[in-house]
Each structure stands twice: as structure tokens, then as C-alpha cells.
Amino acid sequence: MMVRTIAAMVIVLVVAAFQTARAAELPPAEPVLRDAMEKPADWWKSAEGKKLVDNIVSWQNPEGGWWKQYDPKTPRPADLVRGGAGGGDDDWQSGSTFDNGATYTEIRLLARAYDATKDEKHRQAFDRGLKFVFDAQYPNGGWPQRFPLQNNYGRHITFNDKLMSSVMTLLSDVAAGKSEFACVDDATRKRAKESFDRGVDCVLKMQIKNPAGELTGWCQQHDAKTLAPASARAYELPSIASFETADIVLVLMRIEKPDDRVRQAIAAATKWFEKSQIRGKKYELIRDKSLKFGVDRRLSDDPSAGPLWARFYEIETNKPMFADRDGVKRYNLSEVGEERRAKYAWYGNWGEKVINEFPKWQKRVEQRSSR
């Protein structure tokens, strides 16, 4: 009897391990969702469109959000279990996330599908998704990377990879009554506006000051309680992050009637971008089959190159900084190992759009103020 019981327990553990492994091996959903965002309104009425959105609904988690790894082209398997609840760094499927376009993209797609089909289950899934956005927001106005909260860096208020800026843009569009959100009632629009405004207040409080007391930009993630810059993965140290700063500034520029705090934040961040640009250098992608990863990325001299910004700047000195999976701060990209050089964006032209947009934004604000 004991032998049969132990055998049964072993079978259960093996099945559970297999199902969890299947969950971990699911593909990223972002490419499929990104393609669907380009489809015309009538496409959602087609058999292909209806199938895709039905699949998306099937993958919605009970709390209202989505994982970032699942296959939108197929329905969620009935026997697929959620990941463990340990809160480890790889525990992506024990909670929903906003990472890599997740959740806020599905919400937009559901709104478009419902607008085209008027299928009530799509509307209900949209409502659950929007409620998840409200539920996941911290009282101070920020959003974590993952929710329900886990005991890892997913708890931080997250700007990384357009996360908070994309969530705030969604809420801004809902509150403004953009056509794709025609199904949203006045009470929900009001709630979206209040949620967006709390997000703005949180953003302004997190803007980093340098040792001279000047406002600069933002880190990839900030501590949810202290709002201080925080680490995430080993190679993502507390810093001023140019990619994320650019996105959040462009969101602030969308505000119809910015107050003095918002204007000051935008002007200071733009000034920081102007100060921090790198001239006479180009960031090259080198393809070479003889390399371990097939590619490498290097910084080289080029007097004709446009301005570049490092992904990370040291808060104390404003020097470009880098790190590898050992978490050790470095000041030269060549000191980073091949794997992180090949698979991470260490430089980009992210500040260029902010600098170019700033005079246009100033003009718009002045015109609105004179009315």
C-alpha cells in the first residue's frame, strides 16, 4: 500500500514539473500582439481575427492581467498550471506583468475587437484588464513590473522597456475618450484620469537630482517605498537611464495643461539630454559567424555620426557606466563580456526625439496659455 502511495506521489510531482516546464518554455507573446496592433478594424470581424482575440481572452489570468510568455495563436491549454509561488526571478508565470508589452497591449486589442464585433466576452475581458491596471497601481501612483507582488525586483516601480510610460499612455487615451475606447463609461474615464494623475505625481517625485541638486532623469526602476533608484538584474544598477527617461518625458509632454512642476521636469530632463549626448562616436552591430554569439556591439570613432546616449549614467558623476552579470560597475563597454555586449542595447539615439520635440512642446504650451 505504501509503495503504491509513493508511486502515485512521484507521478503527481513528475506531471506538475512537466507542466511547469511547459509554462516556462512558452514563446514570447509580444511579436504576435505587435502584428495584431497593425491590423485594420475590419480584420477583427474575420475568422482569423475572432480566433486570435478569443485565444487572448483564454490566456487572461484570474486577476485580470496576462503573462508575457504565451502563444496567442492557440487557446490556453486546460492542463497548463501556473508557475510556483516562490517569487523567484524566473517565476514569470505565477503572476501577471506589464513587461515586454504585456497586459496593456492585450487591453488595447480587446478594445479594438469589441469596437468591431460587439462581442460581450471581449468587453468583459477588457473591463477585467483595465481593473487589473487600477488594482496593480501603488497608492503612491507607481506600477510594479509584476502583480500580484512577488519577492523580487518585479516589486519595483518600473520604467524599464517603456513599462510605466506605456501604462500611463493607455490610461491617458482611455481618459481622453479616444475612439477605440468608446465602450468606456464616464465613471471609468474619470478613474483613468485620476490614476494617470497619480502616476504623474509619482514620476515627478522620482526624478533624480545630481549632487549639485539639479533635476536630471529617471532610473529603470525605483524602490516602491522610498522612490529611490534601485537595481533590477545584476547588470542594471541604479543610474540615470536615458532610454527610459526619454519615454517618460514624451508622456509628460502629452499633458494638455502642464503645471509648473511638469514644465520644470521636462525642461530639466531635456537639459540633461543636451549635456549628456556623445558626439563623434557610432554604435556598431557587427555580424560575424566566428563570434561566440554571432554578433557583437562596439563603440567606435565616427566624426560624422549623430548624437548618442549611453543607456546608463552614473548618478554621482554623469559618466556612462556599464555592468555584466557579475554586477560590477564598469566605465568602458569593452570591459563587458561578449554575451551582454551582444544581447543588450548599451547606446542609442534616445535623447534626440526629446531634444527635437522640446521647442515644439514649448510652443504648444505657450499657445494654450495665451488662450
Image: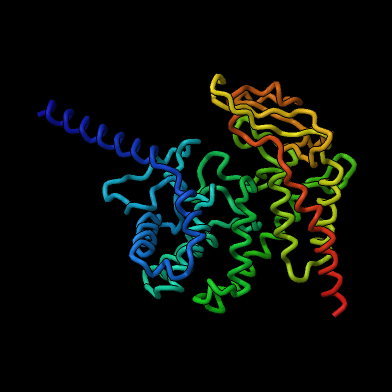
As displayed, is residue 246 above or below residue 370? above
Q: Most extreme residue toward the right, as rendered?
A: 212
As displayed, is residue 325 above or below residue 82? above
As displayed, is residue 229 above or below residue 371? above
Q: Residue at x 52, y 48 (%)?
A: 146
Q: Residue at x 74, y 31 (%)?
A: 321
Q: Residue at x 38, y 63 (%)?
A: 49
The x, y position of residue 238, in whole percent, is 71, 37
Q: Is residue 334 left or right of residue 166?
A: right
Q: Nearer the viewer, residue 171 or 291?
A: 291
The quadrant of the rendering that contains the N terminus is top left
Q: Is residue 99 left or right of residue 355?
A: left
**Displayed quadrant of residue 291:** top right
As displayed, is residue 187 above or below residue 14? below
Q: Residue at x 47, y 47 (%)?
A: 68
Q: Most extreme residue toward the left, as rendered?
A: 1
Q: Is residue 84 visible?
A: yes
The x, y position of residue 257, in whole percent, is 77, 71
Q: How is the image coloured?
A: rainbow
The x, y position of residue 184, in whole percent, is 52, 75
Q: Is residue 3 left or right of residue 102?
A: left
The quadrant of the rendering that contains the C terminus is bottom right
The x, y position of residue 232, in whole percent, is 61, 37
**Displayed quadrant of residue 239:** top right
How many numbered marks does the figure carry? 0
Q: Nearer the viewer, residue 175 or 287?
A: 287
Q: Is residue 340 visible?
A: no
Q: Is residue 225 left or right of residue 69?
A: right
